[in-house]
Image (spheres, rainbow, N blue to C red):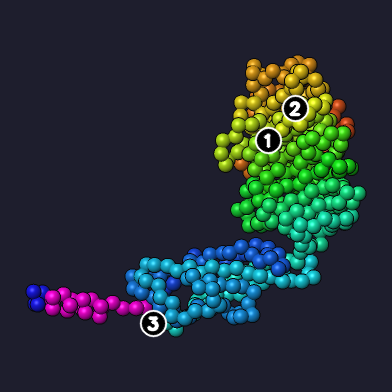
């Protein structure tokens, strides 16, 4: 028994004496990336956290003498090294084949600078007389920050971004004018409410952007990052032209249920509203004239109208499919009833002309009557629709003229939200020229009237165009 235990002890000592640590010689360290890039970081707010993995590819333990920020305590970057928030750490051990993680973020304060500011540093690793380096690179920008504020009349420009925390309200009798190239970013649950007037003056070359404040590319089409824009019942004279509204719960809402005699209004043109958890466009007993607009990628509705009002859509492209669950509602919903019910329904005037409503459901349009039947006025003219005509009680020849039913619109790239028609698209030349007299240019300024045969939807086909 003694002899056996002595042998086991001897073997253990021999094995331990054979185990070596890598401290000198040909040191190998594998990094998950050689440069850590941080997208635009707003002043005083800070960045999201990036992750760096450091792997020991050898079978023997690796000892890193020191890990530190080259900029030291003056650096605008901050590190968490293997679970410890420090700017430097010594004698870091990594077992053979194992890894450790470093997490980094950055605070940038380019006060009073309108242009992005490049901020650089590096993480240095000293091991066995060798020096390794991982670059850190971020861009920062000064901002105008609003947090739960009511504002009077203002002019916003492209000089620097506007970041909204909580709710920003445009006061009654005040006008917020947002000029071309302006960028408005909303933090989680942020919103814009309009009691006065909203005037958005984007251009085709420099649209106005409303989106969440997560600027990493992976968040470009993620919905639900902020609440949305709500134009209240007391608001009048709203115009939104050449804008991109994305990543919200409800992109743009006009009016509120139970508004009574108050009827807010909106002219909406050359605007894309996409990536909404619930709806891209909601409207309650208001007035909307919309042309050259795109509505897409919503959890419930691309366009949701109820409680009466006056709504006209000309040369609009509506397409819906939802990749975050099962969608049970059509892309376009028009109801003479309020939701929730709040009293007698108002008359509904709804027209959908030279436009397309398509998606992956059997029907992408529904019109719901009041309790006394269809009392509103409806006209769908020279449009392409995904529609189950046999089971749609609102279908009638008097309401639908020159329409194309269940024809694939053949957009250039649905997955990339590119709704230009391809070469064989039935949208080409099938619009009613009557509407193009008033709206002779498409969403990007191309002529619709050059051959006298306008295309259906927001885009006019240009020969030779293809998927980017």
Q: Is residue 429 visible?
A: no
Q: Main secondary structure of the magenta part?
A: helix
The stretch of residues the image draws in magenta is 5-25
| Front one among 128 and 422 | 128
Residue linked to disc 3: 24
Q: Residue at x 60, y 53 (%)?
A: 218
Q: Residue at x 89, y 55 (%)?
A: 153
Q: Residue at x 71, y 30 (%)?
A: 333
**Image quarter for residue 91?**
bottom left
Question: In the displayed structure, does residue 424 sit left or right of residue 338?
Answer: left
Quick one: label 2, few (<14), some, or many (20+) residues within 10 Å?
Answer: many
Disc ID at residue 337: 2
Q: Position of residue 10 (x, y in %)?
A: 17, 79
Q: Residue furthest bottom?
A: 129
Are discs 3 and 2 less than 8 Å apart at CB? no
Compared with 197, 447 (above or below) is above
Q: Is residue 45 visible?
A: yes
Which quadrant does the N terminus fall into? bottom left
Name the N-terminal-most of marks 3 and 1: 3
Compared with 220, 126 (above or below) is below
Q: Give the Cα distance between marks 3 and 2.
A: 78 Å
Residue linked to disc 1: 301
Query: Which mark's residue is nearer the viewer, 3 or 2?
Result: 2
Provide the secondary structure element on which disc 2 rests: loop
Q: Position of residue 368 (x, y in %)?
A: 72, 24
Query: Which mark's residue is nearer the viewer, 3 or 1?
Result: 1
Name the N-terminal-most of marks 1 and 2: 1
17 falls in the magenta region: yes
């Amino acid at each position: 028994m003694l002899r056996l235990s002595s042998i086991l002890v001897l073997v253990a000592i021999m094995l331990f004496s054979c185990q070596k640590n890598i401290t000198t010689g040909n040191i190998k360290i594998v990094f998950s990336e050689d440069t850590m890039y941080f997208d635009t970081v707003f002043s005083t707010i800070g960045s999201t956290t990036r992750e760096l993995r450091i792997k020991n590819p050898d079978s023997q333990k690796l000892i890193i003498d020191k890990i530190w920020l080259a900029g030291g305590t003056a650096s605008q970057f901050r590190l968490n090294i293997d679970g410890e928030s420090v700017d430097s750490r010594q004698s870091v051990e990594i077992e053979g084949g194992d890894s450790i993680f470093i997490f980094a973020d950055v605070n940038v304060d380019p006060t009073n600078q309108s242009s992005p500011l490049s901020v650089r540093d590096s993480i240095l690793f000293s091991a066995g007389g060798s020096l390794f380096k991982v670059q850190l690179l971020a861009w920062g920008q000064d901002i105008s920050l609003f947090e739960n504020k009511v504002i009077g009349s203002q002019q916003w420009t492209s000089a620097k971004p506007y970041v909204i925390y909580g709710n920003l309200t445009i006061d009654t009798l005040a006008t917020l004018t947002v000029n071309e190239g302006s960028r408005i970013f909303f933090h989680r649950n942020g919103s814009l409410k309009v009691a006065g007037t909203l005037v958005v003056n984007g251009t085709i070359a420099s649209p106005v952007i409303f989106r969440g404040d997560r600027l990493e590319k992976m968040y470009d089409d993620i919905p639900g990052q902020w609440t949305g824009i709500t134009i209240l019942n007391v608001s009048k004279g709203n115009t939104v032209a050449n804008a991109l509204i994305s990543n919200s719960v409800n992109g743009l809402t006009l009016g509120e249920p139970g508004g009574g005699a108050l009827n807010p209004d909106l002219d909406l043109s050359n605007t894309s509203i996409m990536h909404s958890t619930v709806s891209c466009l909601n409207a309650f007993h208001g007035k909307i004239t919309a042309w050259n607009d795109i509505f897409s990628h919503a959890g419930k509705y691309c366009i949701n109208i109820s409680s009466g009002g006056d709504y006209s859509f000309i040369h609009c492209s509506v397409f819906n499919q939802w990749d975050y669950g099962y969608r049970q509602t059509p892309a376009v919903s028009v109801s003479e009833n309020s939701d929730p019910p709040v009293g007698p329904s108002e008359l509904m005037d709804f027209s959908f002309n030279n436009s397309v409503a398509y998606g992956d459901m059997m029907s992408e349009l529904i019109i719901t009557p009041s309790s006394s039947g269809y009392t509103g006025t409806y006209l769908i003219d020279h449009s392409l629709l995904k529609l189950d005509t046999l089971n749609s009680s609102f279908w009638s020849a008097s309401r639908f003229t020159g329409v194309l039913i269940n024809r694939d619109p053949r957009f250039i790239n649905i997955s990339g939200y590119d709704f230009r028609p391809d070469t064989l698209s039935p949208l080409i030349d099938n619009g009613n020229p009557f509407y193009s007299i008033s709206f002779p240019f498409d969403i990007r300024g191309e002529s619709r009237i050059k051959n006298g045969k306008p295309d259906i939807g927001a885009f006019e086909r240009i020969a030779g165009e293809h998927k980017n």
